[in-house]
Amino acid sequence: MEWIEVTGGRPLAGRIRPAAAKNSVLPLLAATLLCAQPCTLRGVPPLADVRASLALLEAVGAAVRFAGGCVYTAPRPVSGRVPPGPAAAMRGSVFYLAPLLMRAGRVELPLPGGCCLGPRPIDIHLDGLSAMGAHVETRPAAVALLRRGALHAVDYTLRLPSVGATLTLMMAAACAQGHSILRGAACEPEIADAAAFLNAAGAQIEGAGTPVLRIGGAGGLLPGGACRTPLPDRIAAATYAAAAACAGGCVTVEGCPPALLEPFLNFLSAAGCTVTARAGDFTVARDPAAPLRGGAALCTGAWPGFATDTAPLAAAVLLAAQGASTVHDSLFENRFACTAGFAALGAGAQARGRDLVIPGGAALHGAAVTAPDLRGGAALVTAALGAAGRTLVADPGHIRRGYADLPGDLAALGARCRYLAPQEAEKIVEVP
Ligand code: UD1
């Protein structure tokens, strides 16, 4: 098994630029199927989830090429049958529901995998598509959708502002017959990014980034293609910022407007970091000798709230801070599976349902821990930067889903952090 090795106690210094956002790239890859002309996505990182998406596209017969950080697609007839492998590898396979239904007329999708953050139903995706005229059949481990003729326009209210369901219904409405209104839509920046991509290919989407989307349907595939650099990864940016807070030092995150992660930067500032925000980048600095302030009571929420993906990263920062803190995740039931790892590092944090209670003031030390999921794994690596001695993080495959090379990124900022090959890890008998 591969591991990540982190030896804490070294302040970070330098500049880093996040890649394109995973949560933007994945829906855009699926959206290329809606376009009648070739598409290009630029600045795409070689994440495990991106590779799984490309494998899914290839498996259904799409023409796709990934070279030099760009994905090139060309229109070609595709099958609607998604094989279980790529579907189970990531939550992002759900983005293929609407595009394959449009392209192939039918779609059979094994239920999507991804992080085990608690129940992750797809009822809103299915209910909205059904309202547009799709025939929906739910099976024990898959869903099958069929359309006869074009989908029709709807005036549809999402029962909650799901990011994924908003993307699904926006893509479907862009190719349906007539003018749709989607109410209660998610407002995350990834929605506006996808709308800009679809509009460049000929869609007519207005209101992206607000709860009400007005969409003129093309009555079939979008006539054009599009070339786009997806927005920067705000969660990766928050990870680098959290790393600077945990390890101390001074890190500038370039090519990422601070507005994309304002609640997280405000949190770091309240915890005692010096945050300098500029138009397209920001700097997080912290004196490694000065303890951070705890006493935080964080609660995640939909955009523009505190992003759920950054909750474990905030927790990592708070473990050693002076004063007790709490973090509540309002979106997912099991966001804090990383708590066992935090405990092994010497923090007395306790997860109670959606709440994480952090006593603070922990003297963190190295340990052998396991990455339970993508952001929880990144939080363990981040916390380990501020721990004395060596930490080994098992199961870093979760982390590769969202970061092409997190240890490499942190090492470039001066951290002692690297992937350990299985043979190397086997030689390590004891973790100090
Ligand atoms: C996306 C992101 C994920 C992020 C989340 C919230 C991707 C690949 N993942 O996930 O990193 O944490 O947004 O910002 O983009 N829900 C339902 N029924 C549905 C759909 C969702 O009940 O049909 C619930 C979910 O269980 C969850 C909440 O709605 O409790 C939010 O989920 P959603 O916004 O859909 O998140 P994802 O799109 O899965």
Image: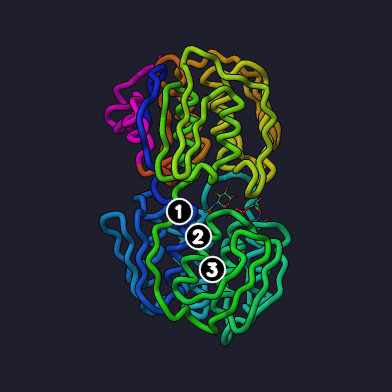
Closer to the eye: label 3 or 2 = 2
Q: Residue at x 59, y 24 (%)?
A: 271
Q: Which of 394 and 263 is in front in this view?
A: 263
Residue sitting farthest toward the front? 279
Residue 150 horizontal/vertical position (percent): 57, 84
* Left or right relative to 290: residue 48: left
Residue at which label 3 appears:
97
In this rendering, is residue 430 above or below 125? above
Q: Residue at x 42, y 37 (%)?
A: 253
Residue 2 horizontal/vertical position (percent): 35, 35
Q: Which residue is drawn at 64% across and 80% down?
A: 179
Q: Are marks 3 and 1 in contact (CB under 8 Å)?
A: no
> Which residues lie in the magenta part?
405-432
Q: Quick one: label 1, few (<14), some, or many (20+) residues within 10 Å?
A: many
The label on residue 231 is 1
Amino acid type at circle 1 is Leu
Q: Can residue 431 be seen in this view?
A: no
Query: Which image quarter is the C terminus in?
Result: top left
Q: Quick one: label 2, few (<14), some, or many (20+) residues within 10 Å?
A: many
2 or 1: tag closer to the N-terminus:
2
* Left or right relative to 282: residue 3: left
Q: Quick one: label 3, few (<14), some, or many (20+) residues within 10 Å?
A: many
Report the Cα–Cα distance between label 3 and label 1. 23 Å
Residue at which label 2 appears:
193
Q: Are marks 2 and 1 in contact (CB under 8 Å)?
A: yes
Amino acid type at circle 2 is Asp
* Secondary element at tag 3: helix
Residue 252 drawn in magenta: no
* Secondary element at tag 2: helix
